[in-house]
Amino acid sequence: MLEIERKFLILRPEDTCLSCYKFSDIKQTYLLPKGRVRLRMYEDKTVYTHTIKTSVTNITRVEEERIITENEYSELLKTADPERESVSKRRYIITHNGFDFELDDFGAGYTHALLEIELPTEDTEFSIPDFINVVREVTDEHEYKNSIIASKGFPDK
């Protein structure tokens, strides 16, 4: 499946701004060999996924994702990359003008968060919800990819 995604560094909204949106607590772990292979556990739903991503452009990737069992998750965790930490985040789903935005909040200790939107084409126009304060687009900035955040931490700049 093709994934066309743009990503923005934003000021972390107040919890009261997000309280009416659905969210999931996610733990994301990257596997060996190095690359874009990850496991994800949705802690509130007890759902496990295995995902492989391959870049086509800076915005477009091929994403192969499948739901796995808890046993498969446990077995695959044995191949976790020891040089990368698991990434824990709370993901809010914000629907605005027909699009679902995903806001990844890395915790109250941070002043910034990430906002992502998946689009049908690379040139699709959209607007960001008014209560979101965008610092800048970071789609092309390597340090804001989750696989790098797992190695170096969230760059709260």
Image (spheres, rainbow, N blue to C red):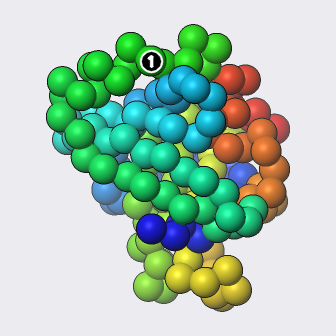
Please, what secondary structure does the residue beneath circle 1 have?
Answer: loop
State left or right for residue 40 relative to residue 106.
left
Quarter of the view holding residue 27? top left
Task: Name the residue: 64% across, 67% down.
Answer: 60
- List the residue tagged with mark 1: 79
Q: Quadrant of the C terminus?
A: top right
In this rendering, is residue 85 above or below 55?
Answer: above
Q: Nearer the viewer, residue 100 or 17?
A: 100
Can residue 25 be seen by looking at this rendering?
no
Q: Which x, y percent locates residue 6?
A: 66, 66
Q: Nearer the viewer, residue 42 or 65?
A: 65
Task: Name the residue: 61% across, 19% down.
Answer: 84
In this rendering, is residue 60 above or below 74?
Answer: below
Task: Name the residue: 68% across, 64% down.
Answer: 56
State left or right for residue 110 relative to residue 94.
right
Q: Nearer the viewer, residue 40 or 98?
A: 40
| Amino acid on which the number 1 mark rests in the picture | Thr
Q: Quadrant of the N terminus?
A: bottom left
State left or right for residue 127 relative to residue 72.
right
In this rendering, is residue 17 above or below 97?
Answer: above
**Within-10-Å neighbours for mark 1: few <14, some 14–19, many 20+:** few
Q: Which x, y percent locates residue 22?
A: 31, 56
Q: Which x, y percent locates residue 9?
A: 72, 52
